[in-house]
Amino acid sequence: TVAYEIIPAIELKDVSGNLLPARVIADPEVRAGPGMSLTPDPNDLGFSGYIAPLPLSPLIHTDLDAMAALLWDERVYQHIGGLPDSPALVALGLRRALAGPPDDHADQRWLNYAMRLAATGELIGRLEATVHDGIAEVAFLLGTAHWGRGHATEGLRWLHEEIARVSPGVACWATTLPENARSARLLTRCGYVPVDPTTAPPLLTYDDGDLVFRRPAAA
């Protein structure tokens, strides 16, 4: 069992000066095991043996332009439809996400979070989950400069805890293209198992040919 220590986060405020909730997750004891390197791997989105403290908080409108600039990278969008024409289009998609589900899908819950470096508060990526029909579909995007440092692994584990808090009892699902080996490794590392798409519930993120992963609801 891995124990996580909650340590103080930087203060994050909205445009009105209200303090936003933020948590920092750190693994106080990281040891190299079989096949594990303590050197960050720039080709791996997830765990490479090094985990830095990671504050997470709700994504807010004042983050969006900086987040869009961070994520506007061909490598980030390689497996999710290709690079948008401009950071402005990325920011537009983020604004739509923050607006929440449309009226005809008011039963859905859209969760959006920012990932930051503890030391500086610098944005490094985002986490999201769409809770619908008794399940949660998760997704994650990280700026390429921050790949291979354990941030995606820690962020996804935190997201599971948050989903369990706001929507207890729901299983987490994720989809990815077969060629996106990094994301598949990350999902497996975080407790997901591949499933036959024909046995999956209706998934908003699924396209024909995608790999489908499921993580059971927290006990």
Image: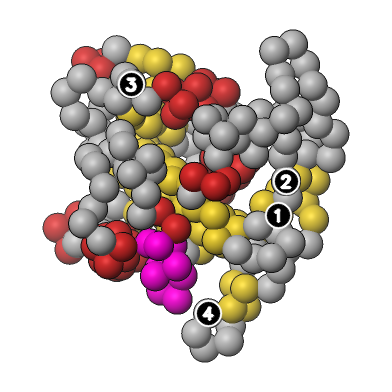
Q: In the picture shown, does residue 138 fall above or below 162?
A: above
Element marked by disc 4? loop
| Residue holding disc 2 | 52
Of mark 4 and mark 1, the one earlier in the sequence is: 4
Residue 97 falls left or right of residue 208: right
Is label 2 or label 1 in front? 2
| Residue holding disc 1 | 24
The mark total stands at: 4
* Residue under the point 29% across and 12% down: 196
Residue 155 seen from this side: no
Quadrant housing residue 119: bottom right
Of mark 4 and mark 2, the one earlier in the sequence is: 4
What amino acid does circle 3 point to?
A: Glu
* Residue under the point 31% across and 62% down: 87
CB contact under 8 Å: marks 4 and 2 = no
CB contact under 8 Å: marks 2 and 1 = no
**Mark sitting on residue 179:** 3
Q: Residues within 10 Å of mark 3 (few under 14, many from 20)?
A: few
Residue 92 seen from this side: yes
| Residue holding disc 4 | 14
Q: Which residues are magenta?
A: 61-69
CB contact under 8 Å: marks 3 and 2 = no
Q: In the picture shown, does residue 66 fall above or below 196?
A: below
What amino acid does circle 4 point to?
A: Asp
- Residue 90 location (% of width, % of height): 29, 59
